[in-house]
Amino acid sequence: MAQAEPAALVDYMRQPHHPADVVVPYGPAPSQIAELFLPKGRGPHPLVILLHGGCFLKQYEGFAQTSALAADLAGRGYAVWNVEYRKLGEPGAGYPGTFQDVGAAVDRLRIEAPKYDLDLERVVAVGHSAGGHLALWAASRGRLPAESPLRVADPLKIGAVVSLAGIGDLQGQGKVFALPCGDDTLDRLLDTAHRKAPYADTSPGALLPSGARVVMVHGVFDPVMPPYTGRDYALKVRAAGDLAKVVTIPDAAHFDLVIPTTPAWKRIVGIIDSEMKALPR
């Protein structure tokens, strides 16, 4: 039986937006919002923080597209916090704004949790591509340098991260990321022209150990972040003393991982289920 072709960017981009149960602004900018998708039944609800990709660039959107994943996960019993953030091309994006947005959105869950019976002891972050990086970074915020403007006193703890074709080491894997996203994208994001140590508080690889379990998921045919990048980052995570594994999905490329009708997504749901069950109760 012939296999279907891997999904393309156009397949991902044409997914319709799914309406959330609640839309929460966490700042004044139009992109400083998060959507909460709630499962049926009584809580406390295990929580998935969902971070879209798109090369950190405004033109690739991402927030509307990941709403399809959020709706799917809510139908499986999870509360889902689908996060939007300022991207390059929007005022205030880059360093420190994009990172502060993600941190603020994650920490906002402390305010929302009592209203919607969210279980903040069972939190898994799931991010795709650039969002995979942001998910790994969000789980590492307890390791931020004291002098960093990204540091907060008590960041919300994330128990596990499922990175879908994400970049974990901005310095070590930056050239791989530059090929599809543009040679200057990371320089713009991190303000490398004006900062002496631009990776020290922005690269998850510089903030280990985070204490979070890590799963690096890649499609075997992914030309954007090939499977070896996840393997290399998992080795770095393990060397720092954290738990990490790599899952390579056959017959899948970069976008199969974030379309809920694909076999790849069904596999990822199983990974999310396993990671959630592994968290201490």
Image (tube, rainbow, N blue to C red):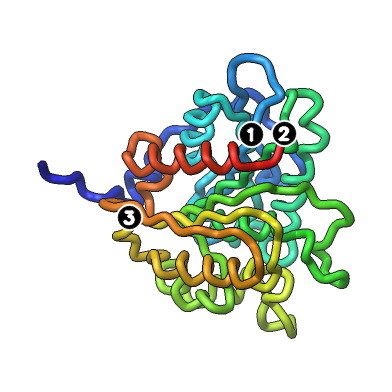
Q: Is residue 230 left or right of residue 83?
A: left
Q: Is residue 181 left or right of residue 198?
A: left
Q: Give, as a three-letter code, the residue at label 3.
A: Ala
Could you say which disc has been placed on residue 35 in the image? 1
- Of residue 86 and residue 164, the one placed in the foreground of this image is 164
Looking at the rendering, which quadrant does residue 78 occupy? top right
Q: Earlier in the sequence, mark 1 or mark 3?
A: 1
Q: Is residue 141 above or below residue 160?
A: below
Looking at the rendering, which quadrant does residue 138 occupy? bottom right
Q: Which residue is mark 2?
A: 24
Q: Residue furthest left?
A: 1
Q: Give, as a three-letter code, the residue at label 2.
A: Val
In contact (CB < 8 Å): disc 1 and disc 2: yes
Position of residue 178 measured from the top left corner of the image (x, y, whole percent) = 47, 73
Q: Give, as a three-letter code, the residue at label 1.
A: Glu
Residue at 61% in and 34% down: 80
| Separation of residues labelled 3 and 2 (CA atoms) | 32 Å
